[in-house]
Image (spheres, rainbow, N blue to C red):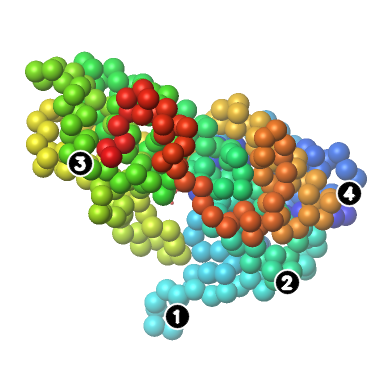
Amino acid sequence: MKRVLVATAGGDCPGLNAVIRAIVKRASQERDWEILGSIQAFNGVLWEPTEVKILDEEAVAGIHFQGGTIIETTNKGGPFAWPIKDKDGKWTTADRSEEMIRKLMYMGVDAVINIGGDGSQRISQALYEKGLNIIGVPKTIDNDLSATEATFGYQTAVQIATEAVDKLVTTAASHNRVMVLEVMGRDAGWIALNAAVAGGAEICLIPEIPYDIDKVVEKINERFVRDRGFTIIVIAEGAKAIGKDASKEHNDEIGYANAKLSGAATRLVEELKEAGIKHSIRKAVLGHIQRGGIPIAYDRVLATQFGVKAFEMVMEGKFGEMVAFHPPDIVSVPFKEAIKEPHFVTLDSALVRNARGVGISFGD
Ligand code: F6P
């Protein structure tokens, strides 16, 4: 019997369950493979007692359209930065990677499939360098990985954000208001840009193009004639005015290493008021709604292909590599290449140019 351990790491993302199901279904076509799921990323392996569950066809039946992940996830800690309290009661971190690799050997695990974003694939690379047979599956709603044309979950997030814009249009028009919608994406503006184009917003503010508040005001004013009119602004959580940093919130969760982006819409509303906008303004922060619920068909299809490919890579011994979508093919790329550089919106991209072509202002 050969064993593969699957972990879902980082923030959850619509389509994770479809990947897990595809791995299990593909494995079931071969003889003598067992798939284990580690609970909450690698925590399940590192905890005492260990918490892993057998993923057989019964366990994954019908989960392809369920949001979240049946094996849970976490974006805190990890084998290289396991939170521990020192003698003075202060939190510090310990490197438990070697211990984890030993434990996996003891558990009879032949290979690991780590489904996660850039941070998780950095961990995959480091574990691979320590000798672990590991394969990565990219996951993020932010679409900020350059090695793959797309990540599952992203299109679902764009769809949810677009539906939010559609809903805000009717209320903004009825009240002659400026409506600001804040969407996720971390340092990438993909979700905001696509939702702005699909939803017909007038203004789109993204991290890659710092905004000039006077330009934003100008565009809003164009949309109002004697107080009648409305404007929809889609702002990415990482957006910032020229010369400013992204708006962040302190986070004291133990082991949480990422900057917690928050407050971009609130700050923009203040800036607009300071700059003299007298129209009624309201804001909506979409938050984790973009990550929840059922994945759209596109993401289920991509996730299913990623799962099948990941298991086939295990059989071929393609360790140290991550699954990637290079249309029309599902391929594999070395972790090193996969994590080399992020994928951001570029100013000269067709989508930015065409967004400008339908009158969308980026505040620049
Ligand atoms: O990376 C995915 C993402 O949803 C980002 O868009 C967002 O900034 C972050 O995760 C939120 O993380 P958390 O779930 O820890 O609040």
Q: Could you tell me if residue 161 is visible in this image?
A: no
Residue designated by label 3: 213
Q: CA distance from mark 1 to mark 3?
A: 47 Å
What separation in Å lies between label 3 and label 2 (alpha carbons)? 55 Å
Residue located beneath label 1 in the image: 86
Which residue is painted at 42% across and 74% down in the image? 91
Q: In the rendered image of this protein, does residue 292 appear above or below residue 333?
A: above
* Mark 3 in CB contact with mark 2 (< 8 angstroms): no
- The amino acid at mark 3 is Ile
Instruction: State left or right for residue 202 relative to residue 229.
Output: right
Q: Nearer the viewer, residue 100 or 116?
A: 116
Which of the two discs, 1 and 2, sits closer to the camera? 2
Q: Tell me the crowding category of disc 1: few under 14, some 14 to 19, or many 20 or more residues within 10 angstroms, Cα based.
A: few
- How far is mark 2 from mark 4, CA to CA? 23 Å
The answer to whether mark 4 and mark 3 are in CB contact below 8 A is no
Q: Disc 4 designates what residue?
A: 32
Report, in whole angstroms, how far the alpha carbon at label 1 lies from the one at label 4.
44 Å
Residue 35 seen: yes
Q: Which residue is mark 2?
A: 102
Depth order, front residue of 348/339? 348
N-terminal-most mark, 1 or 3: 1
Q: Secondary structure at mark 2?
A: helix
